Every structure is written in structure tokens, then in C-alpha cells.
Amino acid sequence: MRRVAWIAVLLGGCGWDLTTSDGLVWLTTQRHVGPDGRIPIVVDVPANATSLQVVGEMGAGAQGYIETVTDASGDVPFVAKETWDGVHNRTNAGFSSGVVTMDWPIAESDGPLIAGTLRFDLRSADHGVDVPLTIAIKQDDDLTRGVLAVDLVYAGTLEGDPAVVAATEAALDHWRDIYAAIGIELDVVEREWDGASKLTSPGYGDADVYREALADKPPRSVSVLVIDRVTDVAGVFGVSGGIPGSLVPTDRSVVSVSVKEHAGRDGLFSAAEIQLYGETMAHEVGHYLGLFHPAELPVGGVVKSWDALDDTPECLTGNDCDARLGTNLMYPTPLCDTPPCTPQANVTRQQEGIVQRYVGVQ
């Protein structure tokens, strides 16, 4: 059951333009970066709200990040500097970006969303910039199950390739099975877009092209763009436009998946490659919903950063991580020393908690 009317009543008169659609309350406004380089984003959170997402679109060439979050009790549960200086990854909102996206609460450990005043301090070195702001708020009576709308887009002529479509459909079935195990049903709508099928990673170029591809993005969906290749990183299977990703359509509001990388050198799709294709979509959308790798790749043979969850162990070397975390959906690389690849479909309870709180899961 989803309720929105109570939010509309309680948020009236808070200085935001308010609409309700797709089971969410949407607040929009535009604020000016002051001479101190800050925009205070103040939201009156109503009772029973479950989670929200803040999106700041910084504009061409501008960068910003969320410096702090202050809750209704006056506590400061998020400080960007702690992320810079630490070894645990919680959100990319604390790092400079042209599109600043933050979910709150991020995880179950952040506690419930407290009714009252919630403040996000957005920081930017680009003084004088006008920043469009959007907040999406959801109320969810059941954080153990939900539906995720997926906007699946075939780029260029890929929808006309029967082998690509058949492999994608089979991979989608595998993705559905992975998410069904954590209580999330996929509602996939497929469409064709006749633009470029070779693109840079979202946010690193091709901004106008991505905006065109996402012009018809449904407002409460995650867009997955099936392309030939990601051009700026060799050998990449897929890339998420954010951790978390924005529900607002921007040049970063997408997961790009390279179908040709999954087909391999022979251009054909084996059962093992389809398994990997489905796990890539589930993995990259997992990033979009707020999940980090449980452990990052070793640097000089030593792992130096991890996610901030208690139920993903802090392994120290590549072999240690392979053994302890290699079957986790969010592991940073496939394990394919000998075909087929080790299945990577496991999701921990705390990872599930982050995904279920994402405002796009209804």
C-alpha cells in the first residue's frame, strides 16, 4: 500500500513547488549558490515518510557535493570529509559531480527518516550558479518487497538484431531471478532509440546524446541503455551513472551496458555469457540503487577500501576477497578463471535494505 495525500497536505507552503505522481511526492525549486559557496536545502519531512532523494543539477561545467546532512534532532549523520578521509564507501554524493544525488536514509543503520526539519548543505566552488533542485519522497509500508520499473532502451539498430534481443531477454530473466530473491519484481518496458550505439560512460562525455536517449524516460524508472560498447574504458561490461543514480532525467541518469563485450570475440552468446550479461545488469543497477562493491580491487596487492556494511566482510587481498565475497552480486569483477564464471547472485540483508529504500522501488 502506498499513500501520498498526507505528504501533500503536510508539505504545503514550504517554499517548494509540489506535485504528486507515480506514488511519489515531488518537490522542485531553484536556488542560488551564495558567496559562501553553499546552498542550504531544508525539507520538512512529514511523519511516515520512508526515504527521499535529493538531486541538484549543477549546470554546464559546474560541480557540487553534499557537505553535511543534519536531521530533525540536530544530529549530523553524514559529513563528506569523513568519507574523503575514510576507507568505507556510503554514497558518491559527498564527492564533486555535475549532478549531485543523495538518498536518505542510505541504509537501515542510518535509522528511520525522522519527521521534522532535514537539512542538506550543498557545497560548490561555482559561486553565483543557479541550481535546479528536486526532492522525491516516498512512503513504503513494506521494506521487504517492491517493484522496480526498468526503462530498457536498445540503442541504434540493436533492437533489429535477433541474437542481441534473444540474449537480452534471457539475461533479463536471470536478472529477474536475482532480484526476486530480495523481494523486488522487475517491471520492464522495452523501447528503441535510434541514436549512437557507441558511447562514453555516463557523465564523462556525450551529455547531449544521453539526454536525447532519456527524453522519454518514465519519471519513476531506472533506464538501462543497451549499446555496442562503452568507448572510454576498455573491456568494460557496464557502467552506472551514479551511486546512487538520479530519478530526474540528466546525462547521468542511466546504466549503460555493452552487449558486444558480453558476446565475446566470436560475437555469439553462450549460456555462460548470458549469465554474465544478466548479472552485469543486476550489478550496475545495484550501483544505481545505492550499492557499492563490498571490497574494491587491491592496490599493490592490498585492498584499501570497502562498503560501509557490517555483513560484507573486510577482506585484505585479492584471493581472500575472491574466497569470502566472490559470489556477491556487487563483487567488482567476474570470477572466470575457467568457464563458466562463478555465479554472482548473492545479496546480503544490509545490501537489500539499501535497495529497498531507494525511492524508485515502489
Image (cartoon, grey):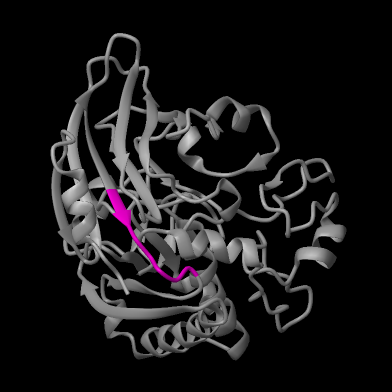
Of the pair 180 and 84, the residue shown nearer to us: 180
**Residue at point 76%, 64% (across, down):** 325
Point out residue 93 in the picture as x, y percentages from the top left corner: 46, 38
Residue at 45%, 51% in the rendered image: 244
Q: In front: 348, or 172?
A: 348
Q: Quadrant of residue 58?
A: top left
Q: Is residue 264 visible?
A: no
Vertical side of 5 occupied by 179: above or below: below
Residue 316 visible here: yes
What secondary structure do most residues of the magenta stretch adopt? loop
Q: In this rendering, is residue 311 above or below 30?
A: below
Is residue 134 inside the magenta stretch? no
Q: Which residue is rendered at x = 51% and y = 71% of the image?
A: 282
Does residue 142 show up magenta in the picture? yes
Q: x, y percentage for residue 125? A: 37, 17
The residue closer to the viewer here, 326 or 348, is 348
Q: Which residue is rendered at x = 31% and y = 30% of the image?
A: 41
**Residue extending furthest toward the top:** 35
From the top left corner, tell me how far across and down residue 126 is, in percent: 31, 18
Q: Give residue 131's position: percent from left, percent from top.
A: 23, 30
Number of numbered discs present? 0
Res 1 → quadrant: bottom left
The image quadrant that residue 57 belongs to is top left
Q: Nearer the viewer, residue 165 or 77?
A: 77
Q: For the magenta stretch, what is the residue range?
A: 136-143
